[in-house]
Image: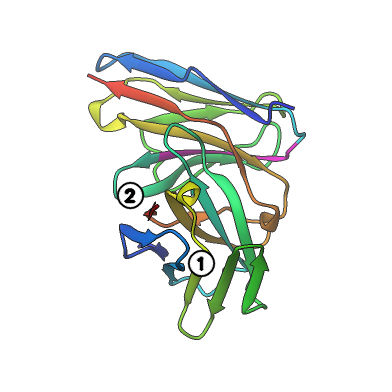
Amino acid sequence: NAGVTQTPKFRVLKTGQSMTLLCAQDMNHEYMYWYRQDPGMGLRLIHYSVGEGTTAKGEVPDGYNVSRLKKQNFLLGLESAAPSQTSVYFCASSQTRINYGYTFGSGTRLTVV
Amino acid sequence: DQQVKQNSPSLSVQEGRISILNCDYTNSMFDYFLWYKKYPAEGPTFLISISSIKDKNEDGRFTVFLNKSAKHLSLHIVPSQPGDSAVYFCSGGTSYGKLTFGQGTILTVHP
């Protein structure tokens, strides 16, 4: 049982380049999320999805796009990377009720130079 | 507007003693509060939760206390162990909503 898998684990981008982060879960969870973690800022929600084909903006959505074409996958795209997007990105999934908690992936460390 | 705040960036405790991590929130609509633990180079893992209708939840060495009138919760770890050294995140949310996380507190337990 893999849980939540994120690829890649590390990436270095040049300013202006684009990339897609992939998140896959095998727990049949309805909800999926993308967070970023920055020093002193905790985990901030970028975008989330409450089901296949749906997406919604979180707290810090600017500069990112997402898609959820299949229930098990949630993609995070950066169209034109900026140094301010240097961060550690975490994907998570959950059942519909929040009290069951989230299952997080191991993260993607992205550096934009 | 930071809805969940952890005002102590770090906490240092001796092995065997109690660790108390604190968290304040502003959103009175939160139904649940959850604590997560994070080791370096890993994703956060769920530790313990509490419903807004309870004031205490216990799971082994971990106990979470909720004071709704003060909009404050705390996580107690007794006794603390070196393996508990990690970043602890407090979070809150509504029943079918999404979680809002605090900034995290780095706990160091010295042998």
- SS label for mark 2: loop
Residue segment shown in magenta = A29-36
**Pick the front one: B89 or B29:** B89
- Bin the neighbour count of mark 1 within 10 Å (Cα to Cα): few under 14, some 14-19, many 20 and up: many
The disc label shown at residue A41, or none: 2
Question: Label 1 belongs to which residue?
Answer: B75
On whether residue A79 falls in the magenta region, the answer is no
Q: Is residue A50 above or below residue B34?
A: above
At x 75% / y 34%, what residue is drawn?
Answer: A27
| Front of the two marks 2 and 1 | 1
**Parent chain of label 1:** B
- Bin the neighbour count of mark 2 within 10 Å (Cα to Cα): few under 14, some 14-19, many 20 and up: few
* Main SS, magenta residues: strand
Label pair 2/1, CB-CB below 8 angstroms: no
* Picture quadrant of residue A91: top right
At x 55% / y 76%, what residue is drawn?
Answer: B66
| Relative to B2, B49 lies left or right | right
At x 41% / y 57%, what residue is drawn?
Answer: B102
- SS label for mark 1: strand
Point out the residue furthest to the bottom here.
B69
Q: Is residue A41 above or below residue B30?
A: above
**Parent chain of label 2:** A
Q: Pinpoint residue B19: horizontal percent, then vertical percent.
A: 44, 65
Callout 1 amino acid: Leu
**Pick the front one: A32 or B9:** B9
Q: Pinpoint residue A26: horizontal percent, then vertical percent.
A: 73, 28
Q: Pinpoint residue B50: horizontal percent, then vertical percent.
A: 63, 67
